[in-house]
Image: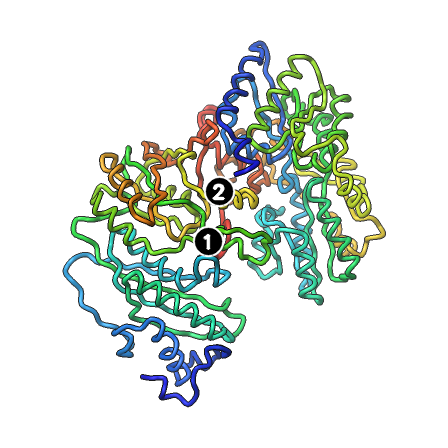
Amino acid sequence: MKYADEFRDKAIAQGIARAIGAEVSSQRAYRFMEFCGGHTHAISRYGLEDLLPANVRMIHGPGCPVCVLPASRIDMAIRLVDRPEVTLCVYGDLMRAPGSQGQSLLRAKALGADIRMVYSTLDAIRLVEQAPSREVVFFAIGFETTTPPTAVMIRIAEEKRLKGLSVFCNHVLTPSAMHSILENPKIRDTGGVPIDGFIGPAHVSTIIGTQPYEPLAEQFGKPIVIAGFEPLDVMQAILMLVRQVNEDRYEVENQYSRAVTRGGNRRAKDEVSQIFELREQFEWRGLGLVPNSGLKLKRAYAQFDAETRFAIHDLRVADNPACECCAILRGAKRPVECKLFGTVCTPETPIGSCMVSSEGACAAYWTYGRVRDEPLRRTS
Amino acid sequence: MSVKGYQRKLDVENGRVDLSHGSGGRAMAQLISGLFHQAFGNEWLARCNDQSAFDVTAGRMVMTTDGYVVSPLFFPGGNIGSLAVHGTINDVAMSGARPLYLSASFIIEEGFPFSDLKAIADSMGAAARSAGVYIIAGDTKVVERGKADGLFISTTGIGIVADGLDLSADKARVGDRVLVSGSLGDHGVAIMSKRQNVPFQTEVVSDSVALHNLVAVMVAAGGSAIRVMRDPTRGGLAATLNEIAHQSELGFRLQEASIPVKPAVAATCELLGLDPIHVANEGKLVAIVAPDLADAVLAAMKAHPLGSDAADIGEAVADNRKFVQMATGFGGRRIVDWLWGEQLPRIC
């Protein structure tokens, strides 16, 4: 497979692993957070932790859109689709995400709600053109990568005068979340470990570029290496982080130079800034209310904003108190340290959203790494 | 019964199924004789009874049944009709049996075009004939528009097993080899590529095919050293091996690099975030074979046209947790779990 197999070469991986092994200092630990679920997935899928020295530990960050979506937003979506005129379009991952009472969009669909799984925002355009009498609502979710397609959808809807289309906007911003993780005193309160550096997002950075991470590296003194989602990308990024730590540097480095520039994708950024603006704050599962971390539609596009159009109000709901998603998303705990992990919370019956998406830290542990962590479970 | 008995010929080109075709009256009789009997043509159906009688030899028989709801009905490499014949033949064949007879039941949505129904029935007839199997019983029901998605088919198959052969998923033993008959994921990817909301094109065609002739050469080479055979349909190789691991109370250790996957299938799965070992097959089998005869069985598979890409992909290991594990092509290892839910709904 072109442009994929080259980045999964075992011999090169072992070469990088040897370099990491040779360069780490045995006097210290290295704790790196991979922000994105895509990196978590690659680490688990290819068994990368087996290639790392014992004192290099990966902490799985909150970069999985389904995982950080609070239960309240699922509740709001279910309320929305309870209206008989509404057809809700969602990306497949979201169907099983648990609401506050254990309900999900999958269950709402079984009870008769009109919910469609889509692969692209253009599917929503097609639906509204086919059924002009329906209120088609697109459940927009994701980081900076999925925001431009939502913006393009709204632009097309405006051009085509599609009156039946609106967006339930849950788009969030990566740098704000990283800022919150580094600043949040709760990380210390929950026994969280200090983070020595970040593997920065792959796809998100193709849009926003590397520049937005520079203030973070500077302010908090943490190295950040932007990396692709292939296993060799991740291995190389870890080596680059080890070198920065060893040399007391804290720079933004770009491992993913085949796709990411400093300035990012200007066209995509323009599309987004035309249609969206910052929310004052947005609730993240695990991080709570994070200022300036979410997007909403500008007033000029209010007709496309499902929250305005259907007057749905923000809900606040409590998560299951035993669920450690919050600590796991902040890197303060590992999935196996949660009492619910693998007992009542499994991919079949997710309690927390880290178990829902295949990119979630708990799901990745469950699917790919159960065996490795079994001894740890028994002793804890 | 002949078509001549009806006032008007069945308009196969432009006609559509309506509720009268399921009513038990003349319209239904015309549909059955004009379309299904022509497609399946054999001495049993020609007698037009509510059942068919056949002689059996002494020995062990196997029986299986399966429902087909695939969407879309026509896909690269086949359609719901050929799939309904191949799938049930394969379920019979996985016992090591020689398939003999099938029955077929059709639930048709009002408004379904005769031309599509004829194409589907014809390909069922062709699939059965080329497999040397007869469709000797059937049923037709028509439901109102909106109550079925075009057409659903159920087929039942029976076959006869050679003396001394007793394959079962609880018979795998530690040290047994895991063989697959060819590249994985072709069927699921072919179906996926034809879904209207998946805007990409691929040359991948379904692998839907009857496997009993391949099974026959394997049985000839391995006999009872073949402990288990399964066709990894829904849930793919991962689900099949997890089932066998649970039934036989052991684990499996696979080598990712040995698992055959076509580049186009790997690329499509990559794009859609799927794993080929979770994707359905309709013309592949997994065999768990005692180690001493595994090479002989593999050689027999490779010598058969349906097994030319066969591979030894791993072994059964002692594991009271019954995990299927895989050494990744990258030098790490991981668990191969069942899928959590449907990866792709309605693929067969």
Question: Residue A324 in the image: x percent, y percent?
Answer: 59, 33
Residue farthest along the top direction in this orientation: A27
Dot 2 corresponds to which residue? B263
Question: Residue B7 in the image: x percent, y percent?
Answer: 41, 90
The front one of A346 and A31 is: A31
Q: CA distance from mark 1 to mark 2?
A: 13 Å
Question: Residue A260 in the image: x percent, y percent?
Answer: 69, 33
Residue at (48, 63) in percent of width and height: B73
Q: Chain of mark 2?
A: B
Proximity of marks 1 and 2: CB atoms separated by less than 8 Å: no
Q: Is residue B153 above or below residue B212?
A: below
Residue B249 in view, yes or no: yes
Question: Is B322 on the left or on the right of A84, as rendered?
Answer: left
Mark 1 lies on a secondary structure that is loop
Q: Which quadrant, please, contains the N terminus of chain B?
A: bottom left
Figure quadrant of residue B173: top left
- Mark 1, residues whose alpha carbon is within 10 Å: few (<14), some, or many (≥20)? some
Question: Residue B162 in the image: x percent, y percent?
Answer: 18, 53
Figure quadrant of residue A243: top right
Q: Which quadrant, please, contains the C terminus of chain B?
A: bottom left
Dot 1 corresponds to which residue? B205
Q: Amino acid at mark 1?
A: Val
Residue A350 in view, yes or no: no
Mark 2 lies on a secondary structure that is helix
Label of residue A39 in the image: none
The front one of B275 and A372 is: B275
